Amino acid sequence: MVGPLTALLALWAQAAEADQEAATPPAQGELSCSRWQDETRVLAKSEWITHVVRPRERLAQIAVRYGVTAQDLAAWNKLSSPRARVRAGKKLKVKTTRVPPPREKIVYAAAEGEDWSEVAIRHRVAVEDLKAWNSQRRGRPLEAGTELRIWIDPGEPRTVNCARGEPPPALEYRDDAASLGHPQSGRLRNGILLPDWPMWTKGKPRGLYASTHALDVMVAAFTQLRVDNGYDGAMFIGSISKRRGGYFPPHRSHRTGLDIDIRLPLLPTVAPETYPTPDNVDWPALWELIEAFVDTGEVSMIFLDHRMQKYLYRAARWEGKTPEELESIIHWPRKDRKWEVIVRHSRGHKGHIHVRLLCGPDEARCGPKRETVLERRGWIEPHPSAKESREGARERREQWKLEGRLTDEGAGEDEDE
């Protein structure tokens, strides 16, 4: 492997070898992961089982649990459509080869200072569901000791942060592929066809050419996802650039080998050809991939439909991030000033994320200049990390704006398809 991130990857490999036996996931993660893995019954062949619908369960969620489709569930149970509502207590017939542990109702006493959102995050449930389960208390602030009914899901698949992973095999490629010009008007010199690697699957070859810098960043991000977060799946890379870059319909960008389309990862119980929806996406895995890209310090922006960002934000909170840490990364729940954050809205990005990287440190003919982007964001370090470099970024921007050093901008650069 070549590129400026080689040393970082080597350190990851050493850490994984040293910590393989000592590394332990958080207590909550251990319980959730072990129950899903140990208590799910895998049948030798498909059998009919009965599922009792729990409060607030939807057909799509039930289908994901058993590795079937909502269409089949509706047909088997003579329901009007895959989106039909099913009441709590209804019994559904399901033909499946896997039977996870059912949802369980617990009673939780709110701690001092906890609000609805914090209780929901603690138990990995949606705050809307939590309030609906406790409708008699909805609209009132929680008091210490308030007892809440919560339906937890020990059968929820967990693919990240259960244990550390083994480093993927080394990847070798040329070091002479460079980005020229801007994302919507540039080209790619000596583009490198995305190599085969266990961490990803690939779309059509004609649109999968990248710069050396882009491959360095991708390898670093996916290696972190495997080693630090234990993800052992493969994500689908749909588009990067053509061999020589340039116009690549239907995209407005994807011209310089620095724009990467990655399909939203599906939960392991979902068929690979299924279109991603909020109920079947592996949101924690997507969050950890995005954080791994951000940790490289080489991301300019990431596009994801604003309506889907809600689920990404929730997953980030599930995995331990605070609202303060996410403020400079995910645009949701705000609706303005999206140029200040990394994950921002752009049309056509419901089933995939679009990762746009900064120009490489040695790509003199690439634009916009990385220093320009970093200063515009208030990230004044040449290689910002995920957290420390963004501390005070908003304050710096506001001060620079008062001094006339920058203006609010970003229109045009965040439109793709």
Image: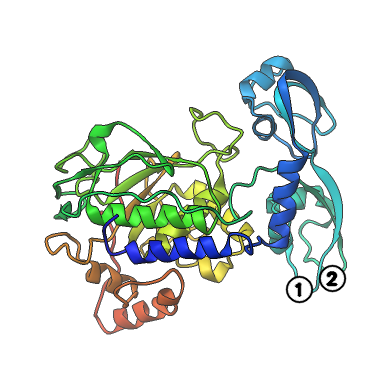
Q: Position of residue 357 (x, y in %)?
A: 30, 57
What residue is at 85 percent from the left and 31 percent from the top?
89
Q: Position of residue 358 (x, y in %)?
A: 27, 61
Which amino acid type is marked by label 2?
Ala
Numbered disc 2: secondary structure: loop
Whether label 2 touches label 1, CB < 8 Å: yes
- With 328 as the anchor, is 321 left or right in this view? right
Q: Is residue 153 visible?
A: no
Q: Position of residue 402 (x, y in %)?
A: 31, 82
Q: Which mark is residue 86?
A: none
What residue is at 47 percent from the left and 53 percent from the top?
167
Of 140 and 99, nearer the camera is 99
Q: Residues within 10 Å of mark 1 (few under 14, many from 20)?
A: few
Above or below residue 276? Residue 211 is below
Q: Residues within 10 Å of mark 2 (few under 14, many from 20)?
A: few
Which amino acid type is marked by label 1?
Gly
Q: Which mark is residue 144?
A: 2
